[in-house]
Image (cartoon, grey):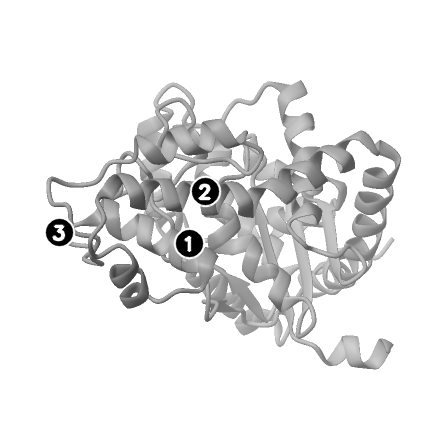
Amino acid sequence: MENSAVQKKKILSGIKPSGDLTLGSYLGAIKNWVELSDEYDCFYMMADMHAITVRQTPADLRRRTLSQLAQYIACGLDPKKNTMFIQSHVSAHAELSWVLNCYTMFGELSRMTQFKDKSAKNATNINAGLFTYPVLMASDILVYQADLVPVGEDQKQHVELTRDIANRFNGVYGDTFTIPEPFIPKTGARIMSLQEPQNKMSKSEQDNGGCVCLLDKPEAIMKAFKRAVTDSDTCVRFDTKNKPGISNLMQIYSVITNKSFEQIENEFASRGYGDFKTAVGEAVVELLRPVREQTEKLIADKAYLESVYKEGAERAAYVANKTLRKVYKRVGFVAK
């Protein structure tokens, strides 16, 4: 059993607990993670260290971190098959990050598009962490010698930087890090905002109805879909350029029902947008109902959640510390 686990390729991914998990997080990421756990050695974290580049209310951050773990499990991630942990519980992330900061160029970080975007949104708090967090992200990946990193288009740049840092370090000190590849799952979807369908669904849109969260009540979900932005046409047709709103709703409906866009177009050929929005909303309500109910049970069982994140951190630290010891030796630090 141990040997077969060693042969498996490693995957690392995580989501910041800076807001509630959205339908986009589930359909675009977590749903795929569940399907990967038999084939790969998977490490999934609550990326709380990344969350604090933007000011957080401490009590809310703690609550969301534990709620996110519960939601991971409720979505089908088995703690026995996957290593699930809280990022700040594995100190090797921060320790490796400092070393890799010294092998990352200022110009590389200056070119990161997310730094520019986040600086614009947080003009009063452009801190050093906001600038260097791609190095922490590289450390997250490299400390586990991850082969694959599930990413969307918006994160590809970070994996490229990680590869550059790893190659640079390996070039100086010899073979130390596995060079990771971005992993685009076969299934899954880029779910867009219900109010601004040209933008990805974001947890920052909870107030304007642009996103649906995994723990939303059915009435809130139905309201969000009934208010979803569409177009002046009445034809349900997949056309991301001219009909981004309807195309996004079709994408959501397709992933949930496994129906092709052609089947969906035929199903709603003689019906208006009102019927279609209602159908999509009802499909989402039924998809998320068991997730919400199971999450509520898990959050109530604090001892169980604690056992999961402690065991996860122990397993993660075992792997991470092996890498860290190797790196410390390579750069010339005296062994403890």
Q: Amino acid at mark 1?
A: Gln
The image shows residue 278 at horizontal and vertical percentages of 36, 40
Q: Please tell me in which quadrant of the rendered image residue 192 appears.
A: top left
Q: Give coordinates of residue 291: x percent, y percent.
A: 63, 43
Identify the mark nearer the N-term, 1 or 3: 1
Say which quarter of the image contains residue 153.
bottom left
Q: Nearer the viewer, mark 3 or mark 2?
A: 2
| Measured Cα–Cα span from mark 3 to mark 2 | 25 Å
**Residue found 70% across the figure and 71% down from its top:** 38
Q: Of circles 1 and 3, which is in front?
A: 3
Residue at image mark 2: 282
> What residue is rendered at 42% in x and 54% in y?
155
* Residue position marked by numbered label 1 in the rendering: 155
Give the mark nearer the N terminus: 2 vs 1: 1
Identified by mark 2, the residue type is Glu
Residue 101 visible in image: no
- What is the CA distance from the residue labelled 1 to the residue labelled 3? 26 Å
Which residue is identified by label 3?
Answer: 242
Does 326 sit above or below residue 308?
below
Note whether residue 98 is visible: yes
Point out the residue furthest to the front here.
270
In the image, residue 10 lies at what x, y percent? 65, 69
Q: Using the numbered discs, state the Cα–Cα distance from disc 2 to disc 1 in whole angstroms.
A: 31 Å
Q: Residue at x 63, y 26 (%)?
A: 61
User: Who is closer to the viewer here, 133 or 235?
Assistant: 235
Task: Name the quarter where the N terminus is drawn.
Answer: bottom right
Whether 59 is drawn above or below 149: the answer is: above
- Whether residue 336 sits left or right of residue 260 in the image: it is right
User: Quick check: 169 left or right of 281?
Assistant: right
Residue 229 lies, in percent from the top left, at 24, 36
Q: Secondary structure at mark 1?
A: helix
